[in-house]
Amino acid sequence: MTLRDMLGDEASVVQQEYDELYEWMLSKGKNPRRRKGIKRSTADNYMPRLDQLHRLVIQHFEPDDPTRIDTEHADEVLRLIDRGEITQQHGSNKGEEYSESSKRKFANTLEIYFRWHYYEKETIDYEWEPKISFTDGNSTSADRFTYQELGQLFDEAKSYGSLPSYYNTSEEERETINGLVAQRLGKAKEEVVREDWLHADWSQKVYAMVVVGYDAGLAPIEIANAETSWYNPKSKVLRIPSEYACKERKKEEVALSDPSVEALSTWLQERRHLSKYDGSNKIWLNRNGNPYESGSLCRLIRKLCRQAGISVEGRKIVWYSLRQTMGRNVTDEGELSEANDQLRHDRLETTQGNYNETPVERRQARLNETHRKAERAKDDPGYNPFEEEATPMNATSTANTKDGTAGNEGAVTRTNGGGIHVDAVIPDTTGARVDITSQILNEESSD
């Protein structure tokens, strides 16, 4: 059944809106703020996919308003496609699950549809993002690294990178690279010999790309676009301009860890000696002097994993695994708002829905604790497995009572010289702080 058949009398209204969407894509679809459009061939590909998605929403959810797709139904239809509950409808592959590439294209179609609703129609108050990250690999989303794997990955990246063969370089190139070798080994350039090239056969390029990619949650296109002007070593931040981000984001500035700052600063010093960066402000270029692409970054991350002994079989290990891991780790170690800012999400709900997952190591530790308590309770009938948690809580409660409002009465006194003296142990609670502050103010007002 066609979309026109499903909509009946309302089909003409939807057709008019889709005509407006098509023209908007050509003029503003790529970057609405800078009024940059997408190619006509790309827009031509989006329209039939949008037609198909619209029919799937009506078929599966029977929405109250069938003339448009809402964000909840968009998330749900992608979930059904991702799980293989919605399969290919026609051709020799009918009934088979959509490829990862097709899933990503469905998500991209919905993204530009809601971008139009947000910027042009103003019918939604936020720029929608899919809850599932599709890639062009064989898997459905990006798997995350454990803390151990992350450490192994960083360690492997540190030693990755090599110099060209000494005998395959011209005298002019050797002169330039001798300066780099001297810098790496901490010796005078005129003292560098061929054997030193073997000792200095490493580079900070890949390590900086991996640790900064992790810290900043950089997408492949952001690695390709990254420029030296984005980096501020003094404030230890990276600023990703919205027009160069993978998605147009209001938040542009992200924090960098000390290891990332050190690695990136070292790499920027190193890249000055490499001729392929002459005249370029790009932070990273591949061996051919071109910006990195998504496929090569995914292959790089998997290669590093294999060399580090990290299993990739049956897992969705792609470049986005770094961003996914960072988002999960920062959410677990800190506040949801911190992860939200570092991921540059506009809405907390996006971070909450995609990254608020407890690391497996923490869950394993909690499970081991339950087994330990069960084993002890079996051997000791008098053991109370909840007592270990209750005791510190009771102690805190007692301390707050003793040193709180009642316990701190008379703690504020006047000295012979007319000053104020406080003699009290003040618990780190709001009530205790308010109480002692009130006593100080009352003492001052009694003059």
Image: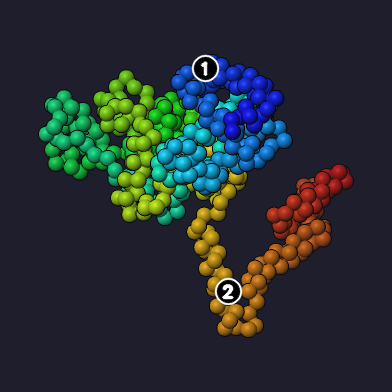
- Which of 138 and 210 lies nearest the eye of the viewer? 138
Identity of the residue drawn at 64% across and 31% down: 6
Residue 83, percent from left and from top: 52, 47
Q: Residues within 10 Å of mark 2 (few under 14, many from 20)?
A: some
Residue 279, percent from left and from top: 32, 19
Against 92, residue 47 (above or below) is: above
Residue 119 location, quadrant = top right
Residue 288 as seen in the image, left or right of residue 386: left
The first of marks 2 and 1 along the sequence is 1
Determine which residue is flagged by label 1.
26
Q: Secondary structure at mark 1?
A: helix
Say which amino acid is labelled 1. Leu
Q: Quadrant of the C terminus?
A: top right
Determine which residue is flagged by label 2.
373
Q: Secondary structure at mark 2?
A: helix
Q: Note whether residue 387 is visible.
A: yes
Q: Nearer the viewer, mark 2 or mark 1?
A: 1
Identity of the residue drawn at 72% across and 56% down: 426
Q: Which mark is residue 213?
A: none
Against 414, residue 216 (above or below) is: above
Q: Quadrant of the N terminus?
A: top right
